[in-house]
Image (tube, rainbow, N blue to C red):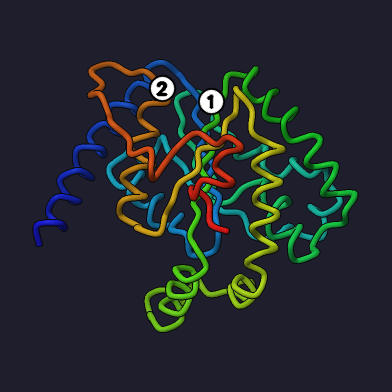
Amino acid sequence: MGKEHGYDKQLLHLQIELVKLQRHIITEGRKLLIILEGRDGAGKDGTIKRIIEHLSPRDIRVVALPKPSDVETTQWYFQRYVEHLPAAGEIVLFNRSWYNRAGVEKVMGFCSDAEYREFMRTVPLFESMLGEAGITIVKYYLDIDRKEQKKRLEARREDPLKQWKISPIDEKALKHFDDYTEARDAMLMGSDSASSPWIVVRANDKKAARLAVIGDLITRIEYKNATKQEVDGKIICRFDETCLTNGMLAR
């Protein structure tokens, strides 16, 4: 009971800060794009729910695109994402993003090797262009270990309120755990930059991960009357090569 109360109190504090941040975004006409990637079951949906819970729905959008249509597969890869980018005064959250190509598409063979290589070559350029256009990009990768993923995917199948989350890809997530690890590492190494960095999150503890993401997010943009935040470096940190070997990312 005490631990739960402590979580609720911290979450409320952070959500109040998010309201201040959104007010700044609206007033100053900023454009904020938040990308959440991670393993299946890592808690992206729950984190997004807590971020948007008390924010103005007119000025924030969550984008979770389905698989591309036959027409979209013939377009420039980034084309279908561009129309969802934030306008002035908006926050947009991508629940999975163009990084599908570096993750599930790569692992499951939904794209060719040439398409994958082209993506990895061009995504830093694309994000650099977005930055020059005034869009602030914050990228989070939520990671869980094999045991935790198995537990969460099994619980998902048994929970009647989470049936919408079940997909054929879920069934293969554990089988391809090592393949996803390899693809994750290549993605983080190849698409991290000073202007568009990856923030990695140890998400085995869902609630701690949510607090860490929100706590980190509100430090990414300066806003009026901000309360100083302390983030737990054992749960969340700016990606660098050491994250691949120091336990921040599951092997």
* Residue 142 rendering spot, x and y as whole percentages: 49, 51
State the residue position of label 2. 221
* Residue 244 rendering spot, x and y as whole percentages: 59, 46
Tag 1 secondary structure: strand
How many residues crowd around disc 2 within 10 Å: few (fewer than 14), some, or many (20 or more)? some
Amino acid, disc 1: Thr
Identity of the residue drawn at 82% across and 60% down: 70
Distance from disc 1 to disc 2, alpha carbons, whole Å, reads 9 Å
The answer to which of 247 and 185 lies nearer the viewer is: 247
The residue sitting at the right extreme is 114
Q: In this view, does 207 lie above or below 148?
A: above
The residue sitting at the front extreme is 246
The answer to which of 3 and 31 lies nearer the viewer is: 3
* Residue 132 rendering spot, x and y as whole percentages: 65, 17
Q: Indicate the quadrant containing the C terminus: top left, top right, bottom left or bottom right.
A: bottom right
How many residues crowd around disc 1 within 10 Å: few (fewer than 14), some, or many (20 or more)? many
The answer to which of 106 and 81 lies nearer the viewer is: 106
Amino acid, disc 2: Ile
State the residue position of label 1. 136
* Residue 163 rendering spot, x and y as whole percentages: 46, 77
Q: Is residue 229 left or right of residue 221?
A: left
Identity of the residue drawn at 38% across and 38% down: 233
